[in-house]
Image (cartoon, rainbow, N blue to C red):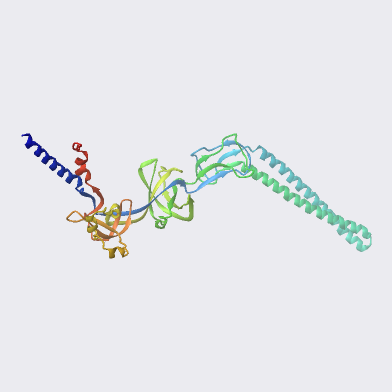
Amino acid sequence: MKKLLIPAAVVLILVAGGIGYYFFNKKPAVVYKTAKVERGDMISAVSATGNLAAVVTVQVGTQVSGTIQKLYVDFNSKVKKGQMIAQIDPSLFSAQVEQTRGNYLAAQATLQKAQADLNDAKRSLERNRQLIKDGIVAQSDFDTAENRYEQARATVKAGEGSVAQTRGSFRQAETNLRYATIRSPVDGIVVSRNVDVGQTVAASFQTPTLFTIAQDLTRMEIDTSVDEADISRVKVGQSVGFTVDAYPESRFKGTVIQVRNAPVVTQNVVTYVVVVGVDNKDMRLKPGMTANVSIETARKENVLKLPSAALRFKPKGGKGAKESAGGGKPSGADQRKPKKEVGQQVYVLSADNKPVPVPVKTGISNDGQVELLEGNLKENDEVIVDQVSNQKKNGGMGSGAPMGPRF
């Protein structure tokens, strides 16, 4: 009995080894992941980011130095053109006005006195001119009268100059006094206040900014940065959709109103500023918010759409894949010939589960789909988007099964 068991065990070991060899050396089945060709609307867009800002923002400063005495507005205050919004201490400016007014009045009085002297000198000269004809006065007396007249005329000219100079100083002092009262130059909303009561502002070298006023927050704009590769697709008048972090569930709309030609270079990356006009009648949007913008560059309705992954798919090596693509094993002569450039193509599955190329021509695209312009495909046809090896299913047993005894 023992003699019969030994040959049977040998046979079983040989059979098990043959079966194991077959399974371990069997090529794994290939599984292809497919997606359907769909029909629908296609929208091509350019993505960008930017910040919201008021269309017109005015920085209100001061042309005179002094201490802030009063503030009449604060953040978010609505103001009208000409409204008083701040007051610089006017004491020094009022004193300068009084001083320059006194100098101006004194100059006017001096001018009047000089004009009176001129009139008297003129009368004396005319009288001496008549008397010298009659031989009543000497020539020296006439010359003296004429000299006095010329001096009186010069004194009047000097008085007129003094009056003009003091008048200018007086008007400058009055202007400085007016500048001590800060008024709003436009209708709008105060979005920034940079001073407090008691703070001293100095306008010696440059005009300090006291307030920033947004003229109209119901109309805003977004300054976006568009990459140079996409700028040729952006045109004035295109529709824009965007979101902001404050309202992630809402999508706002706008319109491209300007494409600026000046390049912006940042770390060797060239971008261009595209300005988007936004309607903000509900006042939900605020200056400075970050906007994620999508500029609609093209739209087509009821077209065939391919998944973008289908254009990127290429069959992975293997005899079947090469033959299905019309390859086969090239001869030596064929290897020496230059390869013919292949246009766009996708792959479909044949009846025997082999990938077969289909030439196509595409149009506009979005993030995940491409418009199909030409190609032997129709709606609901399935195209290959990925190739997955089935080795895990068939070979998992072989890789995880216990090995035989070691000899």
The residue closer to the viewer here, 240 or 187, is: 240
The residue closer to the viewer here, 317 or 98, is: 317
Q: Is residue 372 visible?
A: yes
Q: Residue at x 83, y 54 (%)?
A: 152
Q: Residue furthest left?
A: 1
Quadrant position of residue 401? top left
- When the figure is inspected, residue 360 is found, relative to residue 309, above or below; the finding is below
Specify the quadrant that holds the C terminus: top left
Quadrant position of residue 247? top left
Specify the quadrant that holds the N terminus: top left
Q: Residue at x 21, y 38 (%)?
A: 400
Q: Residue 216: image x %, image y %?
A: 47, 46
Q: Residue at x 88, y 61 (%)?
A: 129
Give the number of callouts: 0
Q: Residue at x 75, y 52 (%)?
A: 161
Q: Residue 122: image x %, image y %?
A: 84, 56
Q: Residue 242: image x %, image y %?
A: 38, 47
Say whether residue 66 is left or right of residue 230: right
Say whether residue 207 is left or right of residue 373: right
- When the figure is inspected, residue 187 is found, relative to residue 74, above or below; the finding is below
Say whether residue 97 is left or right of residue 16: right
